[in-house]
Image (cartoon, rainbow, N blue to C red):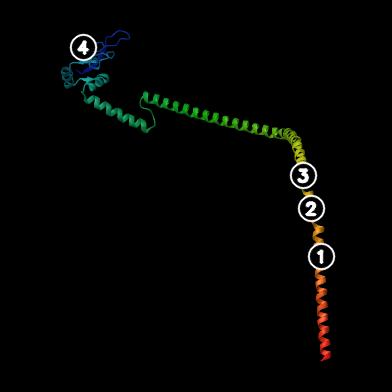
Amino acid sequence: MSVKLRMTRIGRRHRPFFRINAIESREPRDGRVLEKLGHYDPIEKDQAKQIVLNLERVKYWLDKGAIPSDTVSQILLRLGIETKYAKEKTARLAKAKAIARAKGKFFMKAEKIEAEKAVAEAEEKAKAETEAKAKAEEEKTKKEAEAKANAEKEAEAAPEAKPEAEPAEKAEEKKAEVEAEPEAEVKEEKAEEAEVKAKAEASPATEEKAEEKPAAEKVKVEEKKTEAAEEKAEVKEEKSSSKEETEKSDES
């Protein structure tokens, strides 16, 4: 007779509660129980109170060759009891997982779900990046088009603004000329007054110079006359002396 350690559910709906029993392998799930070993309350928040087991009787049945179910094996592992059936099962699972991965397949449904989720996230990320890139390019082209349109508008407005600026410049030049004319007239009047004043100041001096000039000329004429008279006197003296010398020489 083979014995199994398995759980029996006795809780109500939405309130599960399990008993851990030693049952004959040929008995149904809710069949005759050989021994009640403890219970498991998954809703209990306190971890110490979730699992209540008589460990001595559990070890007794394991020594007798009782085979725990997968769930009971996990519960026993949490309590530090590892059976040879649990070890064999983990080894088989590892081997099967390695074979599945070597073939490129998923061993468990959870792995498949995680892989599908990762693929979906990667696709969403790539889609978001492509959309962001397309949006950035669209904005760039839009800005370039706006800049080009603004440049064309400025180029068109520049020739129109230039003729408008020329009359304004001419008007300013005329205004400056009109303002400068009275100033030029005032300057010319001042220059004429200065010339008249200079001429008036210079006329007495010229008259004095004109008066002084004949007097100086008279003095020069007199000086020349005296010099000529002196020269004549000298010539006469020289002639008389030469005549006397010739007379003396003749007498001798």
| Cα–Cα span, label 2 and label 1 | 22 Å
At 82% from the left and 84% from the top, the residue drawn is 244
225 and 74: which one is in front?
Answer: 225
Secondary structure beneath dot 2 equals helix
Q: Amino acid at mark 1?
A: Glu
For the residues bearing labels 2 and 4, Cβ distance under 8 angstroms = no
Q: Amino acid at mark 2?
A: Glu
Label number found at residue 33: 4
Q: Quick one: quadrant of the C terminus?
A: bottom right
Depicted 172 relative to depicted 57: above or below: below
At 42% from the left and 27% from the top, the residue drawn is 118
Q: How many marks?
A: 4
Q: Amino acid at mark 3?
A: Lys
- First along the sequence among labels 4 and 3: 4
- First along the sequence among labels 2 and 4: 4
- First along the sequence among labels 3 and 1: 3
- Would you name the residue on which mark 3 appears? 197
The x, y position of residue 233, in whole percent, is 82, 74
Depicted 74 relative to depicted 32: above or below: below
* 23 lies left or right of 144: left
